[in-house]
C-alpha cells in the first residue's frame, strides 16, 4: 500500500514518503481527515462523521455530501501518491483510515525514552498546537488535550535529563517560557527550581516557588504539594545533594580519548599529580618519547574536578616550528573566527577562556615549544581561573612552571617471580602479550626472560608494548635474543644520537627490520599523513590494500582508531618520525597525498551545499591537518579555492585568506579573486567598489560572486551589493543564496513585500536542496518579517528552530545571533527578565567567540531589556557604547537609528528631554540618509516624548501612527508602552478633543513634514 505521512502535531499536514506536501482541498475535507486520524485504524460511523462535519447545519443529502468529501480526500491522496486512495476504506457502518505513519505515534514512541537526544527528537516533531486548524472541533478536543499533556510531560523529562547532565542554565532558560505558560503545573516548577538552584540562582528558585504558592492560593485555594514543599526546604537548607556536578561533565567534547585498556603501574604518579594540580597553575610532564607522558596526562586530567571541565589540545599534528598553536587551541574549544573580528588568535583564546575555570591539557609541545611557551605565559597572566598541564620533551621555561619528570616503569632487579610480578614494567608487558597470545602467562618459566627484556627496554611503555606484539611469533626468549644487536648499540655509546632516540629508535628499528620491503614502503608512506587517515586515503596515497594495513595494525606499528564515526589509521609520533627518515619516494608520496586531498575537497564542496552538509563538515573537520599539509605540499590555490566555503562555514577567515594568498595559474587566479575579496570584507577590511566589481567579473553568477556580493551587505553598501548579486544564478543553491541576500537588504529597507517573497522562496529552495545552513539563514529573515508584522510568537518559534539548527551544526556565531533574536523578541513582548537572560547568554558566547556582529546584537538586546525594565544607568552604558561604535562606521550602521531612539528614551526618562530630543533627531536623520522609512517611525515617537510643546508632540504621534500603517509595521507591546505613556500625558495636558484634533492633523503629514514641526 502506498506510503503517506500524516502530521497532527500542529496544523494538519500530509506528505508523501518522499516528503512532498499533499494538498487536501477544502475545509470540510480537512475536518473529515482530522476526524479519521483521531480514530485512525478504527471504523468511524457515517452518522458520527456527518455530525462532526456539519452538526445541526447538515445538508439536504448528508450521506451523499459525506461521500463527496470522502471521494475528494481519496483523490487528493492518490494524486500525490498512486495507490494511496486505498488508505480510506469503506467499512460498515462508515469509513476507516489506514494510517501507519502518524507523527503523534512516533512522538509517543520517542516519549518513552529517557535519552536527551530522543526526547528532543520527540519535541521537534511538534509544529504548533495539536490539530491546530481544527482544534475547536468537539471530536478532536480530548485527543488534542491528551497529546498536549504528553508534550508537557516530555518537556519535564527532558528538563530533568538536562539538569542531570549539568545543563542547568540552558534548562532553566527553556523552562522559563514553559512555566510562564503553565504557571500552576508543579512538575515543571520542581524541575525549574532544581535547574535554577544548580545554576547558582537560589534567589530566583525561591522567587519561583513563592510565585507558585501565591497562585495556587489565589486561584485554587490550595497549597503546593508535599514533594515541592520538601524541595523548597532543601533549597533553603542548601542541601548538598542538590549541588550540581562539575560543568566539565557536561561539555560537548573535551577531547579526552575513551578508555581502551588499563593504565598499568601509574597509581602513585596519578595520586601525586592529582594532589599537585589544584595547587599549581602550570605543571609540565617531561621525559623521553615513549615513556607515557600523554597517557598519564589524560588519566590525571580525567580524575580532576574543575568547574568548567577539562580540554585536551593535541599539538602533534602541527609541523615542527609551526606558529598556529593558538588556532589549534581555538579549534579544540570549538571557537571559530567570525566576520569583522580584529582580534589575534591569541587574543581570541584569552577572550574565550577569560571567565572560565578550566584545566587545559597541551599534549606534545616539544616541536612547537616557543609558540606554546608564549601562549601559556599570556594565558596564565590574563586568565586567572586557568590551569595548564603540558607534556613535552623539554621544559616550557616559564616562571612558576613545575616540572614533573615521568619516570620509566619500574623494572625487576632479577628474575625472582615475586619481584617480577611486583614490577610495573613486567605487568604491562605481560598484559599486552596476553592480549596477543591467548594463554601467555607471567610464571616461573617466563619470569627471567621478562625481567631481562624489561631491563633492556628501560621500562619504556611504548617499547614494551611493541615488543609484546612479537611474542606470538617469536616467544618471549626469541624477543629478548633479537634485542642484542639492535639495542645495545644505541643505549649509551652513540652520544650523537638525540636523547629521544637512544632507546626508542632501536625498538622501532628492530620492528622495521621484521617487515618485508612492501610493508616497509607502505609504513613509510603513511608518515606523510597528519593526524591519521581514512582507509581509503591510506590505500590511495600509499598504493596498498587493506590486508597490508591490517598486518601493520597487528604489529602495533599502525594504530586503528575507531573511537569516531569512521575508522582512522594513525602512526605513533615517534614511529612516524622514524619512518619519514626512511621514506625514499617522499616527493611522489606527498604529491599523491596533495592530489588525494585536493580531490576530496573538490568532492566535499558541493556536498557542503546539500543534504549531506553535516557529514561533509565533520569529514573535513577530521581531515583538517591533512588538508593543511596538502596545501603546503602541492595543493596550492586550487585546493584553497575548494576549501573556501568550508572555511566560511567554520568561521576560519584568516586561515582562508592565508591559503588564498598563494599564486596560481590564470584560471585558478580568476576563481580565487571573489573569494579573496569576500574574505577581506568579512574581516572588516575596506575594498574599493571597482575592485569588488573586477573580482566577480569573470564569473558574475557563480557561488564565489554571490559570496563577495553578500559580504558587501555587512559593510552597509546595499546599492553595491544589489548591483553585484548574481542575476542568472548558475544553480538552485546560488539562486536560494541570492534570495537570502535580497531578503537581508529588504529587511534593512523595511520592504515587507520583497522580504516575504525572497525569504520564503529562499527557505523553500534550501529545504528542497537539503542545505541546513541555508535554511537557517533564510529562516532568520522569515522570522525577521514576522517580527516586523508583530507576529512575535511565530517569530520566536522560527528563531528557536534556528537556534537548534545552529547548535547542531556547531555554528556558534549564529547561535549568538539566534539567542539575540530571541532576547529581542522577549523584550518586545515585555518579558524583560527572559530577554536579559537570553541576551546575557548571547553576549557571553559572543565574547568567547570574538564575534563583533554577534556582540553588537547581544549588547543591543541587553540595553533594550535594561531600559524597558527601568535600569536606566545600565541601559545608557550599553546603548551609549553601541552609538559610539555605530557612528564610527564608514557607512551608517544599520542598527544605529534604533539604538539612538532607545538611548533617547533612556535619557528622557532620566530627566534630560533636550538631550533626548537631539538623539531622536539624529536617529531620524540617519534613517532618512539610509532611505529606510520604517526606521523613521521610532524617532518620530521618540521626538514626541522629548519635545516640550504638547501640540507638536501630538502631531508627531499622529504622523508616526500614519507611517506605521503605511509601512505595515505595527508597534510591539513594549513599543506601545512608550507611545501610551506619552499619549496619556498629552491627553491630560491638551484635553481629549484637542489631542484628537492634533493627532488627526499629524496623520496628514509625511515623516519629513512632521520632523519640520520642531
Image (cartoon, grey):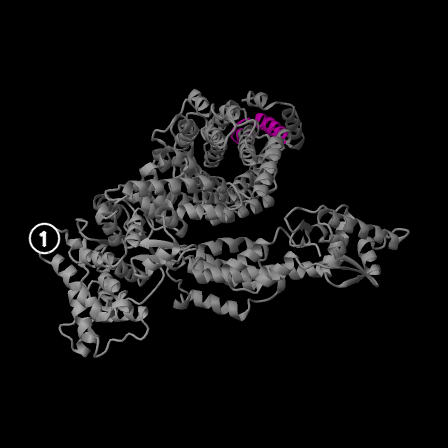
**Snapshot quadrant of residue 1002:** top right
Q: Position of residue 112 (x, y in %)?
A: 57, 65
Up the image or down, 523 lies above or below 295; here it is: above
Q: Outermost residue, right direction?
A: 60
User: Along the line of sight, which residue is nearer the eye, 150 or 949?
Assistant: 150
Q: Position of residue 34 (x, y in %)?
A: 73, 55
Q: Is residue 343 visible?
A: no
Query: Quick one: SS at disc 1?
Result: loop
Residue at x-position 21% and y-position 46%: 369
Residue at x-position 44% and y-position 65%: 235
User: Along the line of sight, which residue is nearer the eye, 294 or 143?
Assistant: 294
User: Along the line of sight, which residue is nearer the eye, 199 or 579?
Assistant: 579
Q: Outermost residue, front direction?
A: 517
Residue 953 drawn in magenta: yes
What residue sits right under mark 1 in the picture? 495
Quarter occupied by the N terminus: bottom right
Up the image or down, 492 lies above or below 850; here it is: below
Residue at x-position 10% and y-position 50%: 496
User: Along the line of sight, which residue is nearer the eye, 611 or 202?
Assistant: 611
Give the left or right position of residue 219, taking residue 645 as reference.
Answer: right
Q: Main secondary structure of the magenta part?
A: helix
Q: Magenta region: which residues? A: 940-964
How many numbered badges does the structure rendering display? 1
Residue 476 drawn in magenta: no
Q: Position of residue 55 (x, y in %)?
A: 83, 55
Amino acid at each position: 500500500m502506498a506510503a503517506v505521512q500524516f502530521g497532527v502535531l500542529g496544523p494538519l499536514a500530509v506528505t508523501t514518503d518522499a516528503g512532498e506536501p499533499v494538498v487536501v482541498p477544502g475545509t470540510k475535507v480537512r475536518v473529515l481527515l482530522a476526524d479519521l486520524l483521531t480514530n485512525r485504524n478504527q471504523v468511524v460511523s457515517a452518522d458520527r462523521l456527518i455530525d462532526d462535519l456539519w452538526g445541526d447545519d447538515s445538508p439536504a443529502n448528508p450521506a451523499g455530501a459525506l461521500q463527496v468529501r470522502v471521494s475528494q480526500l481519496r483523490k487528493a491522496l492518490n494524486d500525490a501518491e498512486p495507490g494511496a486512495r486505498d488508505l480510506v476504506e469503506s467499512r460498515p457502518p462508515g469509513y476507516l483510515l489506514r494510517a501507519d505513519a502518524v507523527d503523534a505515534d512516533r512522538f509517543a514512541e520517542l516519549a518513552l525514552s529517557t535519552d536527551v537526544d530522543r526526547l528532543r527528537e520527540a519535541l521537534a516533531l511538534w509544529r504548533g498546537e495539536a490539530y491546530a486548524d481544527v482544534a475547536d472541533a468537539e471530536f478532536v478536543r480530548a485527543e488534542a488535550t491528551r497529546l498536549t499533556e504528553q508534550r508537557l510531560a516530555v518537556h519535564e523529562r527532558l528538563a530533568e535529563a538536562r539538569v542531570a547532565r549539568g545543563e542547568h542554565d540552558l534548562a532553566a532558560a527553556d523552562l522559563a517560557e514553559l512555566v510562564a505558560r503553565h504557571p500552576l503545573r508543579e512538575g515543571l516548577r520542581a524541575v525549574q527550581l532544581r535547574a535554577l538552584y544548580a545554576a547558582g540562582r537560589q534567589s530566583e528558585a525561591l522567587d519561583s516557588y513563592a510565585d507558585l504558592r501565591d497562585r495556587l492560593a489565589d486561584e485554587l485555594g490550595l497549597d503546593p504539594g508535599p514533594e515541592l514543599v520538601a524541595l523548597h526546604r532543601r533549597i533553603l537548607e542548601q542541601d548538598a545533594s542538590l549541588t550540581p556536578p562539575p560543568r566539565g561533565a557536561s561539555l560537548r567534547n573535551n577531547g579526552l580519548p575513551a578508555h581502551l585498556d588499563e593504565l598499568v603501574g601509574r597509581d602513585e604518579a596519578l595520586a601525586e599529580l592529582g594532589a599537585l594540580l589544584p595547587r599549581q597553575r602550570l605543571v609540565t610532564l617531561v621525559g623521553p618519547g615513549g615513556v607515557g607522558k600523554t597517557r598519564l596526562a589524560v588519566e590525571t586530567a580525567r580524575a580532576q574536578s574543575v568547574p568548567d571541565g577539562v580540554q585536551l589540545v593535541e599539538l602533534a599534528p602541527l609541523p615542527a616550528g609551526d606558529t598556529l598553536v593558538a588556532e589549534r587551541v581555538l579549534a579544540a574549544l570549538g571557537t571559530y573566527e567570525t566576520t569583522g573580528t580584529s582580534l589575534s588568535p591569541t587574543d581570541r583564546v584569552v577572550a574565550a577562556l577569560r571567565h572560565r575555570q578550566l584545566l587545559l591539557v597541551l599534549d606534545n609541545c616539544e616541536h612547537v615549544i616557543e609558540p606554546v611557551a608564549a601562549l601559556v605565559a599570556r594565558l596564565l597572566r590574563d586568565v586567572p581561573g586557568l590551569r595548564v598541564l603540558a607534556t613535552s620533551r623539554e621544559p616550557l621555561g616559564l616562571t612558576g612552571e613545575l616540572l614533573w619528570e615521568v619516570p620509566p616503569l619500574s623494572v625487576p632487579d632479577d628474575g625472582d617471580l615475586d619481584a617480577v610480578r611486583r614490577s610495573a614494567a613486567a605487568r604491562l608487558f605481560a598484559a599486552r602479550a596476553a592480549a596477543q597470545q591467548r594463554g601467555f602467562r607471567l610464571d616461573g618459566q617466563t619470569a627471567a626472560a621478562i625481567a631481562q627484556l624489561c631491563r633492556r627496554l628501560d621500562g619504556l611503555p611504548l617499547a614494551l608494548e611493541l615488543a609484546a606484539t612479537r611474542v606470538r611469533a617469536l616467544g618471549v626468549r626469541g624477543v629478548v635474543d633479537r634485542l642484542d644487536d639492535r639495542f645495545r648499540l644505541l643505549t649509551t655509546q652513540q652520544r650523537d644520537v638525540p636523547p629521544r632516540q637512544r632507546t626508542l629508535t632501536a625498538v622501532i628499528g628492530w620492528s622495521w627490520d621484521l617487515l618485508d620491503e612492501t610493508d616497509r614502503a607502505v609504513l613509510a608512506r603513511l608518515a606523510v599523513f597528519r593526524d591519521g587517515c581514512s582507509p581509503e586515503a591510506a590505500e590511495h596515497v600509499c598504493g596498498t590494500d587493506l590486508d597490508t594495513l591490517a598486518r601493520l595494525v597487528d604489529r602495533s606499528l599502525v594504530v586503528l582508531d575507531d573511537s569516531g564515526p569512521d575508522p582512522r589509521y594513525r602512526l605513533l609520533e615517534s614511529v612516524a618520525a622514524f619512518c619519514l627518515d626512511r621514506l625514499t619516494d617522499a616527493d611522489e608520496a606527498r604529491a599523491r597525498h596533495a592530489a588525494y586531498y585536493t580531490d576530496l575537497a573538490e568532492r566535499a564542496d558541493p556536498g557542503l551545499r546539500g543534504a549531506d552538509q553535516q557529514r561533509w563538515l565533520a569529514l573535513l573537520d577530521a581531515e583538517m591537518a591533512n588538508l593543511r599539509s596538502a596545501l603546503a605540499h602541492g595543493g596550492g590555490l586550487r585546493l584553497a579555492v575548494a576549501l573556501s566555503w568550508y572555511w566560511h562555514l567554520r568561521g576560519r577567515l584568516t586561515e582562508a585568506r592565508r591559503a588564498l594568498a598563494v599564486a596560481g595559474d590564470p584560471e585558478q587566479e580568476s576563481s580565487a579573486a571573489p573569494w579573496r575579496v569576500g574574505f577581506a570584507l568579512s574581516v572588516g577590511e575596506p575594498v574599493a567598489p571597482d575592485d569588488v566589481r573586477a573580482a566577480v567579473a569573470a564569473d558574475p553568477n557563480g557561488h564565489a560572486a554571490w559570496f563577495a556580493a553578500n559580504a558587501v551587505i555587512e559593510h552597509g553598501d546595499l546599492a553595491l551589493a544589489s548591483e553585484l548579486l548574481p542575476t542568472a544564478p548558475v544553480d538552485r543553491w546560488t539562486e536560494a543564496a541570492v534570495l537570502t541576500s535580497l531578503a537581508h537588504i529588504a529587511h534593512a529597507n523595511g520592504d515587507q513585500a520583497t522580504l516575504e517573497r525572497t525569504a520564503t522562496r529562499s527557505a523553500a529552495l534550501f529545504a528542497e536542496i537539503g542545505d541546513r545552513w541555508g535554511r537557517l539563514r533564510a529562516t532568520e529573515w522569515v522570522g525577521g518579517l514576522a517580527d516586523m508584522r508583530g507576529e512575535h510568537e511565530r517569530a520566536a518559534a522560527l528563531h528557536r528552530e534556528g537556534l537548534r539548527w545552529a547548535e547542531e551544526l556547531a555554528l556558534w556565531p549564529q547561535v549568538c545571533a539566534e539567542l539575540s533574536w530571541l532576547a529581542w523578541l522577549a523584550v518586545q513582548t515585555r518579558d524583560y527578565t527572559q530577554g536579559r537572560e537570553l541576551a546575557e547568554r548571547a553576549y557571553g558566547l559572543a565574547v568567547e567567540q570574538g564575534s563583533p556582529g554577534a556582540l553588537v546584537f547581544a549588547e543591543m538586546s541587553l540595553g533594550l531589556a535594561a531600559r524597558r525594565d527601568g535600569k536606566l544607568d545600565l541601559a545608557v552604558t550599553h546603548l551609549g557604547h553601541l552609538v559610539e561604535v555605530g557612528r564610527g562606521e564608514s557607512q551608517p550602521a544599520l542598527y544605529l537609528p534604533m539604538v539612538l531612539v532607545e538611548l533617547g528614551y533612556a535619557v528622557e526618562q532620566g530627566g534630560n528631554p533636550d538631550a533626548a530630543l537631539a538623539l531622536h533627531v539624529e536617529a531620524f536623520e540617519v534613517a532618512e540618509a539610509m532611505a529606510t522609512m520604517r526606521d523613521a517611525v521610532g524617532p518620530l515617537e521618540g521626538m514626541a516624548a522629548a519635545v516640550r510643546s504638547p501640540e507638536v508632540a501630538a502631531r508627531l504621534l499622529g504622523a508616526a501612527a500614519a507611517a506605521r500603517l503605511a509601512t505595515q509595521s505595527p508597534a510591539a507591546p513594549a513599543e506601545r508602552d512608550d507611545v501610551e505613556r506619552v499619549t496619556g500625558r498629552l491627553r491630560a495636558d491638551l484635553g481629549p478633543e484637542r489631542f484628537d484634533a492634533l493627532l488627526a492633523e499629524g496623520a496628514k503629514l509625511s515623516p519629513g513634514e512632521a520632523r519640520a514641526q520642531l
